[in-house]
Amino acid sequence: MKEYNLKQSVLIVIVGSALLWLCLYVFVFPHLAGGGPAKVPLTRSDEKQLFLSIENYKQTFGNYPTGENASIVKALAGNYPHLTFNPTNENGEFVDPWKIPYKFVFDGTNSFTILSAGIDQKFGDADDIIFNSVSNGFVKP
């Protein structure tokens, strides 16, 4: 059996602790915070469905629904009773899998974006999930 001196033992403990914290940070903490990478595909699917519903609304009425999130919910639900996307909060807003309301940004009459705050539940950083109607796809913040 190999014996380690004090310096080597301390180094082993530090490296082992760092690896433990890294594993906890990557695999455990996101799930404890009510999130995790598993919800990203669901969010993308929801945003794609919202995109299609908003585009159908525009084709039917000639313009996009107006107002904030709750107004958009009312417009889409009132005109599309078959709309299967229905996760809403107590304010009547569409919410992502982390229960954060989606943001809708209409850029004039021909384009819009749908934003989810993503895993960390904060808008404006690298994990946001953003669907752009112009590219008909997802973009990075």
Image (spheres, rainbow, N blue to C red):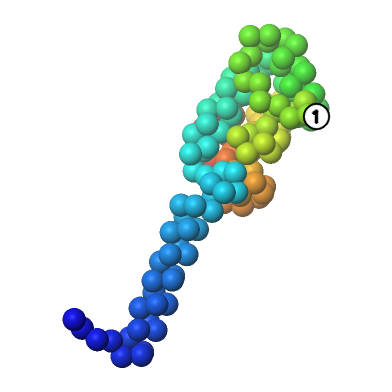
The x and y percentages for residue 5 are: 31, 90
Task: Please identify the residue farthest to the left as the structure is shown.
Answer: 1
- For disc 1, the marked residue is 91
Name which residue lies at 71% across and 35% down.
101
Residue at 40% across, 66% down: 19
The tally of labels here is 1
Quadrant location of the N terminus in the rendered image: bottom left
Q: Amino acid at mark 1?
A: Asn
Residue 90 seen anywhere in this rendered image of the structure? yes
Helix, strand or loop status at disc 1: loop
Relative height, residue 27 to residue 69 (above, below): below
Residue 85, horizontal then vertical, whole percent = 62, 20
102, 22: nearer the viewer: 22
Q: Tell which residue pokes out farthest to the front in this image.
A: 1
Q: Nearer the viewer, residue 49 or 95?
A: 95
Q: Is residue 78 above or below residue 128?
A: above
- 46, 24: nearer the viewer: 24
Q: Position of residue 89 (x, y in %)?
A: 74, 30
Which of 137/71 is in front? 71
Measured as percent of width and height from the top left, residue 114 is found at 64, 33
Quick check: 23 left or right of 71? left
Query: Is the residue 82 above or below the residue 89 in the image?
Result: above
Q: Quadrant of residue 92?
A: top right
Direction from residue 131 to residue 122 in the image, left or right: right
Q: Is residue 62 visible?
A: no
Instruction: Sort mark 1 into few (<14), some (14-19) or many (20+) by Cα contacts within 10 Å.
Output: few
Q: Residue at x 68, y 32 (%)?
A: 95
